[in-house]
Amino acid sequence: MDEIMSILTESLDVQKFDTTILNKRQKMNIYSLEIQYEAAWALMNIIANKKSEQIQALFTPKVIIALIKLFDSTSDVSVANQVLLAIGNVIAENPGLCYQCIYLGVIPSLVKQMMNFLANEEFIRTLSWVMANICHVKDQPTFSETGYDLLPISYQIVTKKDSETVANSIWALTYLTDDGLDVLMNFEKSVIRDIVPHLTSSNIELKSASLHLLANIACGNDELTNSIIKYGTLKHLGKFLTGSNKEFKREAAWMLSNILAGTKKQIDAVFKAGLVQPLIELLNSDMEKIQEKAVWAITNIPLCGAKHHVFQLLDMDIIPPFCQCLNASRPYIVESTLEGIKMILEQCHERKKEVCRKLIECGAVENIKRHEKEGNKRAQEHTRKIISEYFTN
């Protein structure tokens, strides 16, 4: 196998031919392209039939350098696409080889050839797939040097018509913005306008990528959140909150939890979109990851909102379903619920008796007292304040 790999690697660089006769040069150049294409195709097929550890053993730096060198230098889109497929298969599910490709300069070549072959749909589709795989390993030191150069081309190809290409480019942006506050602070807001329509796509992958990216963007600054609202995201979220797809429910609730941690105008927008009632209904979800996001969302209303927002919650009879979350097994859910109860009491002085009565009627007070002994430090702090200020008599 080593001998075969050596032959194929040499075949990637078939550029030696007699330049004295133009016709001969042209014929040899065509011949060279054919050999390069076939060599790249053969390498891709070798990858497809090998396990990850075998691929890492076969694809030495010499082989990777040859692939990247050819990819960077070729002016033939068919060769470029075939080589890129080989590179993509090398790095797919092989993080170590992905780091090597980044270190050996694949990213500047991607940027360069994207501009050269932007009009070729097949090539751009392959490029988007490779980008998504590379961005999935963004937490590695090798990525930080050049990886963020992929941001501008991700912005550019997210507007393409091919759904697979767009989904891949959105996933690339999603991976870049997962816990990537530095990226979010400089995120191109006009891209949000291009993403929002995909929330209604019949392509599940495209819809999922779009929802996840928008949820990430909602973790950013107020300008980004304003753009999310401005371009019509909220009108689509109700169907995710009330649908059967649990992952979509979790993503939508998470997005809203971040929007509701924003300005009072942004909280107003969520209420006006009719999204608070579906969030309340998710408090009873049998999936704690969904319940957790719903609790965060509801808690952020008294934390960040105005008194009239809390009164709206009370008019929706928030106390009984919210207090049910005190029975959750996850400490963070209980802690957030206690914080929410404390903030509701602090915000609704005029309706304090009503809230206290409902807390007693639904059995929450005894539950709250229980967490004074059993809860974590933050939960105990919230509990003591609730009991001492509102239930000492």
Image (tube, rainbow, N blue to C red):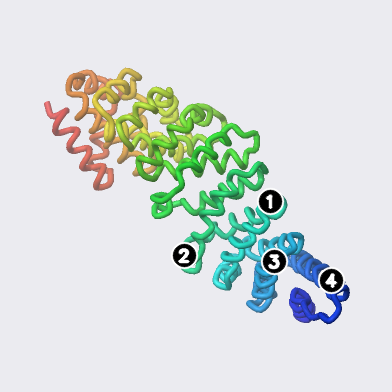
The residue wearing badge 1 is 119
Give the residue type at disc 4.
Gln
Which quarter of the image is occupied by the N terminus? bottom right
Give the residue pinned by disc 4.
26
Q: Identify the mark nearer the N-term, 4 or 3.
A: 4
Mark 1 or mark 2, earlier in chain: 1
Crowd around label 2: few <14 · some 14–19 · many ≥20 (10 Å): few
The amino acid type, in three-letter code, at marker 1 is Ala
**Viewer-side label of 1, 2:** 1
Q: Identify which residue is drawn at 54% across, 49% down.
A: 155
Examine the rendered structure and indicate whether residue 142 appears above or below residue 386.
below
Under mark 2, the amino acid is: Ser
Dots 4, 1 in contact, CB < 8 A: no
Where is mark 2, residue-wise?
Answer: 144
Rounded to the nearest angstrom, the CA distance separating label 4 from label 3 is 40 Å
Q: Amino acid at mark 3?
A: Lys
* Earlier-in-chain disc, 2 versus 4: 4
Residues at marks 4 and 1, CA–CA distance in whole angstroms:
25 Å
Q: Residues within 10 Å of mark 4 (few under 14, many from 20)?
A: few
Mark 4 vs mark 3, foreground winner is 4
Residue 51, labelled with which disc? Answer: 3
Instruction: Name the quarter where the C terminus is drawn.
Output: top left
Q: Is residue 270 above or below residue 156?
A: above
In percent of width and height, residue 358 lies at: 27, 21
Using the numbered discs, state the Cα–Cα distance from disc 2 to disc 4 in whole angstroms.
Answer: 42 Å
Disc 1 vs disc 3: which is toward the camera? 1
